[in-house]
Amino acid sequence: MNTLSINNLSLIYKNGFQAVKDISLDIGNGMFGLLGPNGAGKSSLMKTIVGLQKPTSGQIIFNGKDVSNNPDDIKQNLGFLPQDFGVYPKVSAYDLLEHIAVLKGINNSKERKEQILSLLEKVNLSDFRKKEVHTFSGGMKQRFGVAQALLGNPKIIIVDEPTAGLDPEERNRFNSLLNDISQDVIVILSTHLVEDVRNLCSEMAVMNNGQILRQGKPADLISELENRIWSKPVDTTELENYLSSHEIISRQLIERQLHITVFSEQQPEKFEAVNPLLEHVYFRTLTQKP
Ligand SMILES: Nc1ncnc2c1ncn2[C@@H]1O[C@H](COP(=O)(O)OP(=O)(O)O)[C@@H](O)[C@H]1O
Ligand SMILES: [Mg+2]
């Protein structure tokens, strides 16, 4: 079992902006979902965990060892798929993996070759190993990204918004790949897609404005909302009234009709009961007043 403990972690950028505010998390093997809207601070938190940014305060403890001031201690055990990979050099997929493997310190050339070939197989890119990565489709690039993250058999894999920009089929394929690799390692997945967390993650946290607002098992967080979520079709003109009298957690057009979903301990008049979903947990967490 691997453990990653984040204790009171804060990150203030050079311009004085605090993107990570006193975050504490305990993460074990399996897939952990970090769910939050754009600008929540997910990438800032992940870049701090992987050692690309030094925390302003707080600790990162990996398998009992404080790695916050010496990122090299975690780098050997870590694979990272950043949100923005930047520009790919004009070399083949195989050669790029070879290059990254050397950087990761896999010095034995036979071992390097074996790992690269088996990872290409795992992410379904064996047939494309001689092609240059910049010519790949979005889904292929992300699968390549997983292969490079897995070089060196890391114990923690961090993937930052990996399915943004993938079409539904590529997204499914990518998610099942993540699911396959998450058995014996820690995988931290950041996303703004509630569905991906629901389908993949055994533990999750909701992040906004640099803070962790909720954390737990998706199923537990959902069951807390049992008999507390209600919905009703409304006219746009009535919306103002409901906003002042109800705790609205989302508004949605269903077949061109506006529906509001509210949180309430009792059934509000003329509202229908709704089975709680993870998106209700997410929306309620984001709209809830502290
Ligand atoms: N290098 C930086 N300097 C200053 N502010 C930054 C920097 N990088 C990100 N931010 C700010 O930090 C906040 C969180 O950004 P980010 O971590 O990218 O969020 P997310 O990944 O959840 O979309 C945003 O307001 C963003 O503008
Ligand atoms: Mg981000």
Image (tube, helix red, strand yellow):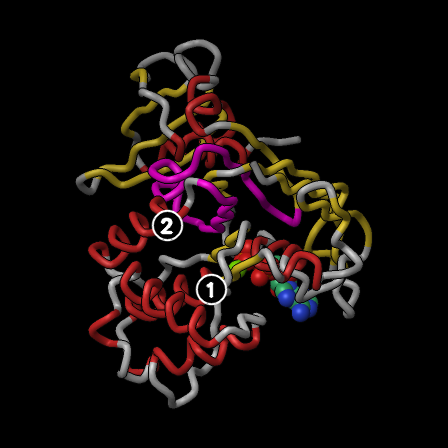
- Where is residue 28 shown, x and y percent of the image? 56, 36
Of label 2 and label 1, which has the lower sequence position?
1
Please check the rendered image and state whether residue 162 is part of the magenta-colored stretch, yes or no: no
- Residue at horizontal 47 percent and vertical 36 percent from the top: 282
x and y percentages locating residue 279 in the rendered image: 39, 35
Q: Quadrant of the C terminus?
A: top right
**Residue for badge 1:** 151
Between the C-alphas of marks 2 and 1, the distance is 15 Å
Q: Is residue 185 magenta?
A: yes
Q: Quadrant of the N terminus?
A: top right
Between 211 and 116, the residue placed more toward the observer is 116
Vertically, is 76 above or below 275? below
**Which of the pair 269/215 is nearer the observer?**
215
Identified at 77% across, 60% down, the residue is 70
Q: Which mark is residue 178?
A: 2
Amino acid, disc 2: Leu
**Residue at mark 2: C-beta within 8 A of ligand 2:** no
Question: Looking at the image, is mark 2 or mark 1 nearer the viewer?
Answer: 1
What is the span of residues highlighted in magenta in the rendered image? Answer: 184-210
